[in-house]
């Protein structure tokens, strides 16, 4: 198959094939996180990359859904982890949508971090 353009994942420069928006590596998203292909959610490809490397632990507390729930299928296990923007002020910018601004957190750690940092409050209302 002929190579056309680069992968649409913002930090990836791998070539993609015709009729595909992502490279071979990122095309594995389907069995890990179905929503990762959405153009408005590039951070989910970070989860795919971490999962493919065998790094599926919460980066805050170490919870690993593969160890805790080994009989669940991959999508169910991966849904127990969220991709958190370390600096939420840079969300939806090229700078903010890079692996250096992401961390993989379990649902509990993500909620606690968001609460402590006020991420749930609209930017215009933050002090």
Image (tube, helix red, strand yellow):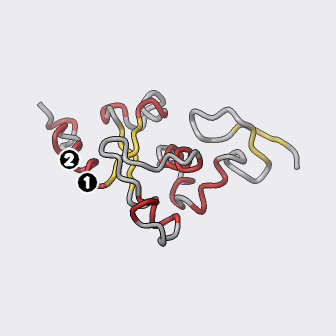
Q: Nearer the viewer, residue 33 or 67?
A: 67
User: Residue 21 in the image: x percent, y percent?
Assistant: 68, 48
Q: Is residue 63 left or right of residue 45?
A: left
Secondary structure under tag 1 reads helix
Whether tag 2 and tag 1 are in contact, CB under 8 A, the answer is yes
Q: Nearer the viewer, residue 82 or 119?
A: 82
**Rounded to the nearest whole Å, what is the CA distance between mark 2 and mark 1?**
6 Å
- Position above or below: 7 against 32: above
Determine which of the numbered discs, if any, sits on residue 36 in the image. none
Q: Nearer the viewer, residue 125 or 49?
A: 49
Name, please, the residue furthest toward the left.
Answer: 127
Name, please, the residue furthest toward the top.
Answer: 95
Q: Is residue 19 left or right of residue 39?
A: right
Q: Which residue is mark 1?
A: 108
- Position above or below: 80 against 9: below
Q: Nearer the viewer, residue 97 or 93?
A: 97
Question: Callout 2 environment at 10 Å: few (<14), some (14 to 19), or many (20+)?
Answer: few
Q: Quadrant of the C terminus?
A: top left
Indicate the quadrant where residue 96 lies.
Answer: top left
Residue beneath the point at 72% across and 52% down = 20
User: Residue 65 in the image: x percent, y percent?
Assistant: 41, 59
Indicate the quadrant where residue 49 lies.
Answer: top right
User: Residue 9 in the image: x percent, y percent?
Assistant: 59, 40
Determine which of the numbered discs, if any, sits on residue 112 in the image. 2
Q: Is residue 87 left or right of residue 14?
A: left
Residue beneath the point at 38% across and 51% down = 82
Q: Is residue 70 left or right of residue 84?
A: right
Question: Callout 1 environment at 10 Å: few (<14), some (14 to 19), or many (20+)?
Answer: some
Secondary structure under tag 2 reads helix
Residue beneath the point at 58% across and 33% down = 11
């Amino acid at each position: 198959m002929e190579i056309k353009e680069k992968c649409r994942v913002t930090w990836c420069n791998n070539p993609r094939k015709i009729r595909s928006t992502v490279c071979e590596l990122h095309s594995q998203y389907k069995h890990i996180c179905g929503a990762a292909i959405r153009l408005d959610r590039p951070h989910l490809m970070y989860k795919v990359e971490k999962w493919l490397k065998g790094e599926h632990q919460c980066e805050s507390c170490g919870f690993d859904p593969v160890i805790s729930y080994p009989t669940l299928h991959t999508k169910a296990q991966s849904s127990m982890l969220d991709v958190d923007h370390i600096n939420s002020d840079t969300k939806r910018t090229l700078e903010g949508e890079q692996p250096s601004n992401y961390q993989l957190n379990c649902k509990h750690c993500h909620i606690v971090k968001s609460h402590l940092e006020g991420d749930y409050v609209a930017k215009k209302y933050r002090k």
